[in-house]
Amino acid sequence: MTQQAVPSPTKDSTPPSWSIDDTANGLSLTIRGDWKALQDDVVQFPATALTSSHPGSGKTLSINPDGLGSWDSCFIMFLWTVKQAACQASLTFDDHALPSSAQRLLALLPEKVEQPAPHQQDRESFFARVGGKTLDILHETATSSALLLEVMRGAVGTLRGKNSMRLKDLLVDVWNAGPSALLIVSIVNFLIGAILAFVGLLELRKFAAEIYVTNLVGIASAREISAIMTAIIMAGRTGGAYAARISTMQGNEEIDALQVTGISVAGYILLPSILSLILMMPLLYLYGTLVSIFGGFVVSMTMMDISPTGYWLSTFNGVELSQFAFGFIKALFFAGFIALAACRIGLKAGRSAADVGIAATRAVVIGIVGVIALDAVFAVLANAAGI
């Protein structure tokens, strides 16, 4: 006979205990005492009690509750443990002698604990992934288009005097996007012009065509380099700042406060940012083009025999006005794309401090890549138009 150690009794209760006896009909589990969940100790039934102590002692395990007192869920949990051990020992669990309520509760539990199925990682097909990405791109395009339309409505409302944009905010953004960026725009464009002139002189000197370096620097700066470099500078400097500022407002719940009070976010926050960059970028492009040509002029004066007046006359005679107009239009589109993308990224950023840095980084990366992609589109259009 296997006897369970009796735990210390509680006041006015009989301690629970159990024992296993060999009978002619198999094994009999005798249960005594009060089985309450608030006992000082929990009675355990070892999983090997049936297989190690009574091997081959019949094929049935019956329950004898003659000494059973009061009981609750603690008793049902003990019986469930016994039932699992009987299943493991290939014994038939006979609970007919138990109270009917205990039988019904025990019947709700399985004979053994089922292990959860291993997690199967869902792997979408190639077409499903492509379709999902396509839908995401279309959704983002639609959202950005709706945002642009709302900003344009705000601009029209401003002209009518019915918008919430403040002139002070516009002037501050104009200063930050324009005059504050003159130094870095000057340095980068000057060095780019100097590099173009230096490389061009080294190559053109082989063909005794040094004079054409003026056309090289002028056309490259006016048509491509100055517009792209200025846009990249503004994407890294101003676009990142826009995204960080708006995402910070998102985290501080300032955007929510504006929406609750009925103030248009597009007109109050986005419109000054986008409008200031659209106003300043073309001017910065023209300024950067002149600085780039001046950088080529400085290098040319040190490496080739030409007068300053001759250099400038050759430059402006060789560069048509349409090249400046083409670059000016590209700068407008670059500015609109950078500002809109940065504002959109800031609005959909999270609300934590880390999300501010993520939004600024994404705005810079998307701005730079988008500018280069737009420039490729303009190159194709210019080629088709014969510009």
Image (cartoon, rainbow, N blue to C red):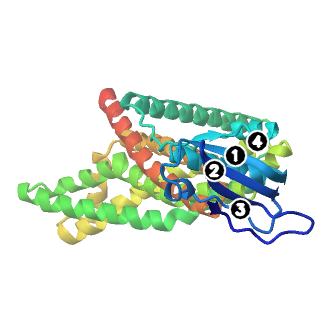
Give the image quarter of residue 146: top right
Contact (Cβ within 8 Å) of mark 4 with mark 2: no
Q: Which of 203 and 354 is in front in this view?
A: 354
Residue 22 rendering spot, x and y as whole percentages: 60, 51
Which amino acid, by three-letter code, is at mark 4? Leu
* Disc 2 packing (10 Å; few <14; some 14–19; many ≥20): many
| Residue depicted at 44% across the width and 28% down the height | 131
Mark toward the start of the polypeptide (1 vs 2): 1
For disc 4, the marked residue is 98
The kind of residue on which mark 3 rests is Val
In this figure, which residue is indicated by the disc labeled 3? 43
Q: Is residue 209 left or right of residue 182?
A: left
Q: Are marks 3 and 2 in contact (CB under 8 Å)?
A: no
| Residue of label 1 | 63
* Picture disc at residue 82: 2
Spatial CA span between label 4 and label 2:
13 Å
